[in-house]
Image (cartoon, rainbow, N blue to C red):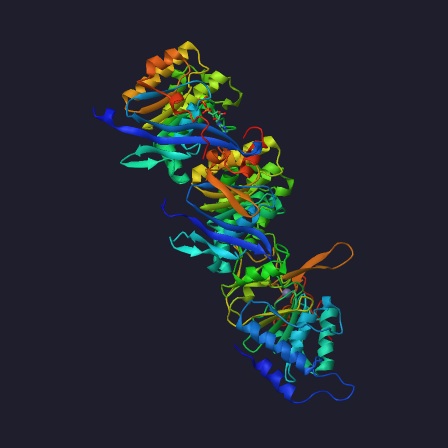
Amino acid sequence: MTLEPMRAAASAVLEGGPGEGEYNFAYLDEQTKRMIRRAILKAIAIPGYQVPFASRDMPMPYGWGTGGIQVTAAILGPDDRLKVIDQGADDTTNAVSIRAFFARTAGVETTTRTHEASVIQTRHRIPELALGADQVLVYQVPIPEPLRFLEPRETETRVMHALADYGLMHVKLYEDIATHGHIAKTYDYPVKVEGRYVMDPSPTPKFDNPKMDNCAGLQLFGAGREKRIYAIPPFTSVKSLDFEDYPFEPNKFDAPCALCGATDTYLDEVITDDRGGRMFVCSDTDHCEDRQASGHRGHLHVDGPAARGTVA
Amino acid sequence: MTTEQTAILRLRDVAKGFVIHLQGGLAIPVVANVSFEVRAGECVVLGGPSGIGKSSILKMVYGNYRIDRGEALVADGGEVVDIASAMPRRLIGLRRTTIGYVSQFLRAIPRVSARDIVAEPAMAQGMGEVEARAKAGELLARLNLPERLWSLPPATFSGGEQQRVNIARGFIAEHPLLLLDEPTASLDAVNRAVVVGLIADKKAAGTAILGIFHDEDVRERVADRIVDVSGFAAHGEAAA
Amino acid sequence: MSDQPLLVAEDLAKYFGARVGCREVGFELYEGEVLAVVGESGSGKSTLLRLLSGQSEPTRGRVMYRMRDGVTRDIVSLSEAERRFLFRTDWGFVHQDAAAGLRMGVSAGGNVGERLMAVGWRHYGKIRSEAETWLERVEIDPARIDEAPKVFSGGMRQRLQIARNLVTSPRLMFMDEPTGGLDVSVQARLLDLLRRLVADMGLAVVVVTHDLAVARLLSHRIMVMKEGRVIETGLTDQVLDDPREPYTQLLVSSILQV
Ligand SMILES: Nc1ncnc2c1ncn2[C@@H]1O[C@H](COP(=O)(O)OP(=O)(O)O)[C@@H](O)[C@H]1O
Ligand SMILES: [Mg+2]
Ligand SMILES: [Zn+2]
């Protein structure tokens, strides 16, 4: 696995603090970043294990992904190139403001191109393009504890993790099948990491679960309000929980992307007019545009400027 | 047959009394120096007036009442066990394999049918359920308990009906020692005769029987010997 | 069945500061044996049950348990993982309050299946059919498998709790006032069911109760506790029919017909 980004970040630390009236590099003070890095290293050492950390107040509300932002701040170095996505798109308010935040506080280059980015912060999605060994994916996580809704006592969930006492997790899936005839969970779908810890992949759709498995890039998860960091090191086994007779199945879509014609991507439903017109398009905007640029066409593709605004 | 010589039960200087703490430690001496034996294939009947301690002796032998002094030796296969000092677990085992008991009154178990109550001791001795239930049916039929009652829990049966269930339960299994506490008390002449026949069968099979029989006629027909409990009365002697 | 005891309590004591929870408790329990612990509330019954089941540590003495592999272990020396494993395989615990022993919001099937899933069952169909079998055995209509215990009556909840425990064929069950708070007729049904299951499965049971009728019906042996100590012990019918201690005589005489 590669810790290049962290080494870069570490060298940035050595280059000195901020001047009068300025932000520190990437906003957080050096001591806080070191503390977060220690938590990250521990998380990498114990794949899937939730490491507590002293989450700081950030200049934005919790729902904005302060956990992911702190992780990004701790690993970012001056040479990094940052991409931020929300629901797969680079142009939502949340993504735009986080990108702007780091452009201002760390002065790093930003990009919307997945393959160009060294650090990608995300909420809800994993890019369609497989991560490379030189890339880090940072997830913003609202609720890190997969057992929370089954067992509200924190002391008990900790013991359950410590003892790999996960029968309860399957009870939840059992209940799903009993009620709906299938495992109804479509996002937040629990996984077992390296055969040991059960982990919550944050609100990503289960479509993305297979991408976490044996992934070349480093995956880091930050939960600000819940003060937890966890990680999946590169090339780690990540298996979605299931039953032998009800095996895990990623979400399936009936139609290809209306713009690029892809049949293997996660699609969002987009309302096209006020007469109830709708279409299904890739939620990963960069991927969709890439495909269109290389000549792939969906049935609603229009030539010229992309049908959906690109990031300025 | 040499079984007639074999003592299955031997009581030696057994004493029993009660201390009623709720009445200021009132001591009720019941029996003392009880000594007699019962051999395989014979029926020994305890005699003496009511309240003299006959039932108490049976209960001591069954382990239901504690023995204050002396010993009650029971032959269990090749072993001799003293009921007075046996561990509860040993007593439970003896009740299954060696000592049968027909109490004066049936203790009904809620929701368990008459037939199943009867079959249970045989099954505890290893008989299959089907066979045990069939044998239970035979015994109940022999005791003239109407078949429509077999599948019902006996809680609502009349005294005589309950007693016949109790007798069948006591006779179904193969215990080398059988204790009978007035089994015929609430039975009519016909069923008394049935019980006399059952006892004769057990004796013929080598079972040692220790019983209490109110009815003169029954006593005469089953008893090989009578042990008069009046002779063991613990006159004023304080209970241990 | 082994002729070694399954559970042995040796000179157990538990103090809460200067207060005595229980003391000088010793007994052996064999497979297939049902031991009733009786006494009024506050006499140390539940304290003893917690010690026996490893939920609290004795101040003195020890509890030995013969594990499935035949090795006898001191309960206190078990790791948390081993203890939990015992609790979801070889042991059962039936609480007086069903809510403490059930997941009230999870379906009956999920409640019964939980132990199976915890020991690695991963086939939904098999888990479900095993749950159905057990619902039937505790006289709950299998058609109600998808209903949660919060809509069940008190008696049904207790029976569900029993099914949930027995599904892994434990060898030892702890029961804390299993019939407490139930109507008399509901109690009778539950007791009969317990009696039968215990006999069929050859279970060893420690049942805590203040109800001598429960002890009479379920147990082979009885321990009478008072102020934290065992004051009288023996065959159940012997202790109930020929009670020796003043306190036991009082207990027995305060009920009309046990
Ligand atoms: N459980 C008991 N507690 C106190 N006294 C008892 C108990 N059982 C029997 N007794 C007393 O022991 C004496 C003998 O009774 P019992 O053995 O029933 O006599 P019998 O069977 O000869 O009529 C009586 O005084 C009776 O009241
Ligand atoms: Mg009598
Ligand atoms: Zn597309």
Quadrant in the picture for residue C107: top right
> Does residue A228 appear to the left or right of C242 in the view shown?
right
Tell me: residue A63, above or below residue B100: below
Q: Position of residue A201 (x, y in %)?
A: 60, 64
Quadrant in the picture for residue C18: bottom right
The answer to which of B148 and C226 lies nearer the viewer is C226
The answer to which of A227 and A6 lies nearer the viewer is A227
> Does residue A42 appear to the left or right of C201 in the view shown?
right
Residue that appears at 59% across and 37% down = C155
Looking at this view, name the residue that lies furthest to the front.
Answer: B236
Residue that appears at 60% across and 39% down = C180
Q: Position of residue B173 (x, y in %)?
A: 35, 27
Callout count: 0
Residue that appears at 48% across and 43% down = C205
Quadrant in the picture for residue B212: top left
Q: Position of residue C213 (x, y in %)?
A: 54, 33
Q: Position of residue C41 (x, y in %)?
A: 61, 43
Looking at this view, name the residue that lies furthest to the left.
Answer: B1
The answer to whether residue A206 of the structure is visible from this angle is no
What quarter of the picture does the C terminus of chain A occupy? bottom right
The answer to which of C124 and C3 lies nearer the viewer is C3
Tell me: residue A54, above or below residue B115: below
Residue that appears at 47% across and 60% down = C77
> Does residue B23 appear to the left or right of B11 in the view shown?
right
The answer to which of B120 and C41 lies nearer the viewer is C41
The answer to whether residue C112 of the structure is visible from this angle is yes
